[in-house]
Amino acid sequence: MTQTTLPPVEKTQPVSSPRGTISDRARAERKLGWLLAGPAFVVMLLVTAYPILQAVYYSLFSYRLTDPENRSFNGLSNYWVVLTDPLWWQSVGVTLLITVITVAVELVLGFALALVMVKALASLRPVVRAAILIPYAVITVVSAFAWQFAFNLTTGFVNSWFAWLPGVSDTTDWFGGTGTSLFVICLAEIWKTTPFISLLLLAGLAQVPEVLQEAAKVDGATRWQRMWRVTIPNMKAAVMVALLFRTLDAFRVFDSIYIMTAGANGTESVSFLAYRQTIARVEIGLGSAVSVLLFLAVVLIAFLFIKGFKVDLAQARGDR
Amino acid sequence: MSTRSKVWWIVGSILIIVYCLFPIAWIVSLSFKAPSDISNGQFLPTDPSWGNYSTILTGAASDLFLPALRNSFGICLIATFISCILSMFAAYAIARLDFPGKKLILGTALAVAIFPVISIVTPLFNLWRQIGLYDTWPGLIIPYLSLTLPISIWTMSAFFREIPWEMEQAAQVDGATTWQAFRKVIVPLAAPGVFTTAIIAFFIAWNDFAYGISLTSTDASRPVPAALGLFTGASQFEDPTGAIAAAAVIVTIPVVVLVLLFQRRIVAGLTNGAVKG
């Protein structure tokens, strides 16, 4: 992962001095480097590494904020409580479902948007680009409200607009059941984040060499074949970056669920579960355990991606 | 391109525009609905009114909304400013200087960027209570740095790589020190990149909900997204939908203005950091 997104430093890197003979200038440069980058580095560690270590510590205690005197060390039993609770597995299932559905749809839809943007007329392009940035820039809470109000029984218009669809009527309560609630949550998430994916894919499309397209065309490849055999393999790196970022982002889903259902009807995600334990129930110990597990899940996903990534990268480089 | 495929691409473009703007149009339309109109089951209001806007700006909900707006602007601007300053120096070092640990810094930024916010909220909630940062501006500005700093470092290093560094060398040949070359030559060249990074960082801070809802409890520091989540109507018997819609429109205006003014830069900023290389 780090390799694919690292800026190509070779271009601007000054020639380093031979090993063993660090000149005064190189030493000064090294010092200046850490002097300039150090503060940002330290702040990043302070705002993340420190809290997560604190969370690991808290997670080993039975600790409720309303009852601080009875704080006691109880080892890993918080983790045992969480992992044996069906609520936890329910939230993991919901989170995974939302992640898989939204990322899959966004990838396909984002690719379609990117293709249209490439081909859009020069006069329309700025308008399309501005429009596409708007879902990205709109606050997630606002987007969640917009979708919630649209489907809501009393405030919405969806039921009256789509009454002709089988299963939809004036009294369809979208937020009354798990499936339909998740459907609307996914719609909101997809609307909000597809543009970001499409911009990353658009940048990837721009990197596919035009020569290859022409060559394939001359060889008689159809439009469809060119898409699958030339375009997509050549933008694998961009696809993977978009996938990684969106998967991790989707896995942390919180805002939309809080606004749209507040976790009702079994729509609780892992993030929401952690929030509810800590902030609403002030069970610091249990909440910390959920937070640590969420963190580990994200690390695991990132690790799986990076492992898959290196292979893809090697292939992409071998192709050229 | 043949005329027929041209027409198709135009239709495609229009579909994208509708897709992107439709929910926004809906929330705007909703914000103009009078209470009697809210549940009319239609997209448009039958009799548009400014009632919801006066509720949140001068009426009953203004006590909740206006302080939140002030908090959001203040906290987000300060967080954006701090992370831009810090990442400006870091990105310069990463793009320009040769020193060990460069990869470590970029790797850390990436790790922080994928960090689940809620995992930080839990310990901070308790810690902030103990040291008195709960429900204060610094209590939000500090965790906001975890959102804005990584993307700032990545985006800005990507921009800084494209700066013509020969000019810096030329300045150094003319007798400028490394620091002078940075300040007099590079800063003016880097300003557009820094500015774009600031916009993106601001978007991210402005969007935050998890920290806002967890680490605040009063209008001393509660930002707008969190306040929206707590909205009730003018009286407890009134439906808050219209007021929420009006507040949502108001907080959307700044981002729409930024998008319209700087769309080209924002796209470059978003894609540079992630895809190139």
Image (cartoon, rainbow, N blue to C red):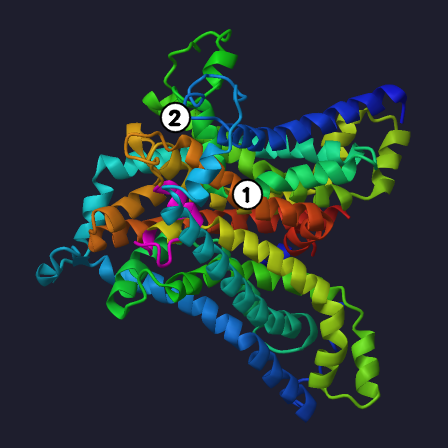
Q: Which amino acid does label 2 sit on?
A: Ser
Q: Is residue B216 magenta?
A: yes
Q: Measured from the top left, where is residue B246 in percent x and y?
A: 48, 37
Q: Label 1: chain? A: B
- Residues packed near mark 2 inside 10 Å, few (<14), some (14 to 19) or many (20 plus): many
Residue receiving disc 2: A181
Res. A256 image quadrant: top left
Magenta stretch in the rendered image: B214-230
Q: Is residue B3 magenta?
A: no
Q: Measured from the top left, where is residue B149 in percent x and y?
A: 53, 63
The quadrant of the image that shows the N terminus of chain B is top right
* Distance (Cα) linking label 2 and label 1: 25 Å
The quadrant of the image that shows the C terminus of chain B is bottom right
Residue at 67% x, 77% y: name it.
B97
What element does badge 2 sit on? helix
Residue receiving disc 1: B252
Res. A12 image quadrant: bottom right
Q: Measured from the top left, where is residue B16 in percent x and y?
A: 67, 30
Observer-nearest of B184 and A195: B184
